[in-house]
Structure formats: structure tokens, C-alpha cells
């Protein structure tokens, strides 16, 4: 399967798992974004996940799948804060997501420190989701940036406890 199909099918899989409509998948080439290391982006107003063609053509298929999970989680967050998605997210979390989506610090809008970008709750949540899905569906552990490792582990532990309570 070529990498473009991996991006399309991976996004469908992620959306199915999340219980949301599959975002439109598009591909772009933008020298400035490539220079900033932008592999993909969720465009909330248009409900599109856009992948950088230059990256897609050279990436490992599993890297693309991680990105599908990550960006689809942003689509899930967007649906939830607009009351158009699953309602199992705590109100306090939704409020944080809404604030961060409205004031989103993304490398495409301004040059921000990577730490500031990574410390956003919406990014921590998307990274944790992608990590968990890659482990569950592909048996692969993804790299977690050191600066947010503690936060990711807390989310993953909360999910484990929640899953165990469902089994009781």
C-alpha cells in the first residue's frame, strides 16, 4: 500500500475508533511548512487533515499511521467542543480544549518554542491517544517527548483504570 493510501485509510481507522465522521484527507506541498518540519495539520474550520506531500513520500508507513491517530484526535477534540461528538469527555477538559483550539499555538502561525507547543493539553491528549492506539493496534511504542512524558503517563494510567472499572 502506498503512503497516500496509508494516510487515507489510517484516518478512516482513527475516525472509526473515535466515533466521529472521517475528516477529509488532503495533501499539500508548502516549502515554508516543510522547512518548519510540519508533517500534517488539522484544519478545523474545513474539517480537513492535510498531509505534507514531501513528508508522505519519504515517511515510514507507521509514522504516517501515528500522524493519522494524532490529527484525528484533534478532529475528535473539535467535534467534542462543538457538541457534535461523543460526550464522555469531562466539562473541565472540554473548556481547556476550547480555549486552546481558539488560541492554538501552532508552528504555522508563529514561531513558538517547541516546549510551549507540546505543553498544550490538546497536544498532550493527541500524543497520548496516538501512542495508545499504536500500541493497541500495531504493538508499537511511539516516542514521547521527555517534556510531556509524565503527563502522557498520567493519561495512559487513567485510561487503564477506567478500562478496568468497565470490566467490574
Image: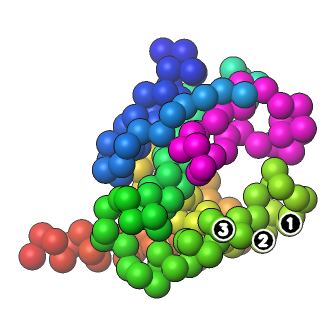
Residues at marks 3 and 2, CA–CA distance in whole angstroms = 16 Å
How would you rate the neighbour count of disc 2 (Cα within 10 Å): few for under 14, some for 14-19, many for 20 or more? few
Residue occupied by mark 1: 113
How would you rate the neighbour count of disc 3 (Cα within 10 Å): few for under 14, some for 14-19, many for 20 or more? few
Residues 130 and 71: in front is: 71
Residue 8 appears in view: yes
* Tag 2 and tag 1, C-beta contact below 8 Å: yes
Label 3 vs 2, first from the N-terminus = 3
* Tag 3 and tag 2, C-beta contact below 8 Å: no
Q: Position of residue 61 (x, y in %)?
A: 55, 28
Q: Quadrant of residue 41?
A: top right
Placement of 125 over or under 16, stated as above or below: below
* Secondary structure state at the residue bearing disc 1: loop
Q: Position of residue 111 (x, y in %)?
A: 90, 59
Query: For the magenta stretch, what is the residue range?
Result: 29-53
Residue 21 part of the magenta-drawn span: no
Q: How is the image coloured?
A: rainbow
Q: Residue at x 41, y 39 (%)?
A: 22
Q: Residue at x 78, y 69 (%)?
A: 115
Q: Position of residue 8 (x, y in %)?
A: 49, 27
Q: Residue at x 45, y 33 (%)?
A: 10
Residue occupied by mark 3: 102
Image disc number at residue 116? 2
Residue 42 appears in view: no
Q: Residue at x 47, y 78 (%)?
A: 93
* Tag 3 and tag 1, C-beta contact below 8 Å: no
For this orientation, the residue located farthest to the left is: 168
* Secondary structure state at the residue bearing disc 2: helix
Residues at marks 3 and 1, CA–CA distance in whole angstroms = 19 Å
From the image, which quarter does the C terminus lie in?
Answer: bottom left
Amino acid at each position: 500500500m502506498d503512503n497516500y493510501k496509508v494516510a487515507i485509510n489510517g484516518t478512516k481507522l482513527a475516525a472509526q475508533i473515535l466515533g466521529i465522521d472521517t475528516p477529509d484527507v488532503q495533501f499539500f506541498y508548502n516549502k515554508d511548512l516543510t522547512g518548519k518540519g510540519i508533517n500534517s495539520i488539522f484544519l478545523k474550520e474545513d474539517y480537513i487533515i492535510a498531509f505534507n506531500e514531501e513528508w508522505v513520500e519519504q515517511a515510514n508507513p507507521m509514522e504516517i499511521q501515528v500522524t493519522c491517530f494524532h490529527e484525528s484526535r484533534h478532529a475528535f477534540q473539535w467535534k467534542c467542543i462543538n457538541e457534535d461528538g461523543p460526550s464522555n469527555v469531562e466539562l473541565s477538559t472540554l473548556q481547556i480544549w476550547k480555549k486552546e483550539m481558539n488560541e492554538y499555538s501552532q508552528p504555522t502561525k508563529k514561531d513558538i518554542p517547541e516546549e510551549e507547543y507540546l505543553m498544550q493539553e490538546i497536544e498532550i491528549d493527541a500524543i497520548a491517544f496516538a501512542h495508545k492506539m499504536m500500541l493497541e493496534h500495531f504493538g508499537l511504542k511511539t516516542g514521547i517527548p521527555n517534556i510531556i512524558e509524565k503527563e502522557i503517563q498520567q493519561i495512559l494510567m487513567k485510561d487503564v483504570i477506567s478500562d478496568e472499572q468497565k470490566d467490574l
